[in-house]
Image: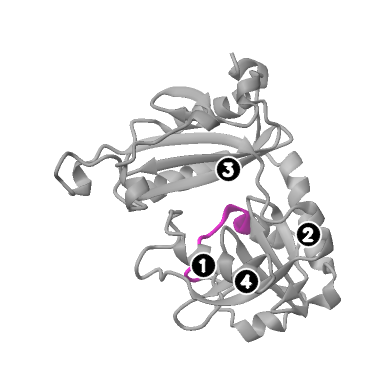
Amino acid sequence: MNDKYKNGVAYIDDAYIALAEAKIPILDRGFVRSDATYDVAHVWNGSFFRLDDHIERFYWSMDQLRMSLPYSKAEIKNILTKCVALSGLKNAYVQMTCTRGVPTLGNRDPRLCKNRFYAFAQPFVWIATPDQQDSHFSMVISNVERISSNSIDTRIKNFHWLDLTMGILDAYDQGALVSALLDGQGNITEGAGFNIFSVKNNTLITPDKNIFEGMTRRTIIEIAEKISLPCETRSLSPEELRNSDEIFITSTAGGVMPITELDHQPINNGETGGITKKLRTLYWERLESDPKCIPVDYEKESV
């Protein structure tokens, strides 16, 4: 591993560079208009998890936004793998991004832009560190309303994060680490970079509307089916969430994370619940043994 890459590697304009040196054009609509889509995969103990699924979803998102790139899925897979290999990171956060690009001079027609591709790998990112998860993880229900799927399909991973960011600030203002946002009907949606699960009477409940359908959420639903744990995808009210036996959130940036306090009231007496513990264990075990795990050949790819 080249020492200059130890904090991450970026791929821009067909070149691999140190992440700290990465730059994008100031007129790129991805920057000035949040006109972009992205996806985030991760590497754990030297292997990608569900990389093909992430790339498949990335292409679907581009298609929904009428974007395209001159790269095949295999080529993007190779680019992401090389970013990780060059960095030498065994646990990494890996992002692929497609922006609308730079408009032609004096023209605002997005159809005339040449879409641009960016990628990078950096050290693994946690929404809540393992220590925070094992001690005290507090969430509040924010009054900030999540952008409606009627405006932009929330299944498309995008940079429209001002509502989520205001939710983060709301959580900090209230002495919590994260917040859950509501939709226009007052139902629970999601938080900044994570999905929400309630556990009640040995049944999982997770919102089904106005959310990004996260890959970790998908994995937990699959695990639940495998162990015959009922899982309902439906509307979830704030009151129902407050009355949960257990609450946990899911994200590529942390896996399965227990919420031990909601709106300053303890959940499960402030302890991680048994079902949450079981799902968290099964999730991390799957990252070690699942056929969807793809080892990174650091020696070959870093040449």
Q: Regarding mark 2 in the picture, which secondary structure is present there?
A: helix
Q: Regarding mark 3 in the picture, which secondary structure is present there?
A: strand
> Based on the displayed image, in which of its 4 quarters is residue 106 positioned?
top left
Kind of residue at disc 1: Met
Compared with 268, 59 (above or below) is above
**Which residue bears the numbered disc 2?**
133
Q: Main secondary structure of the magenta part?
A: loop
Distance in Å between CA atoms under marks 1 and 4: 10 Å
Image position, residue 39 (x, y; %): 50, 46
Outermost residue, front direction?
173
Outermost residue, bottom direction?
239
Q: Nearer the viewer, mark 4 or mark 2?
A: 4
**Which residue bears the numbered disc 4?**
173
Left or right placement of residue 188 versus residue 278 in this view: left
Residue range in magenta is: 209-218
Q: Regarding mark 4 in the picture, which secondary structure is present there?
A: helix
Specify whether residue 228 is in view: no
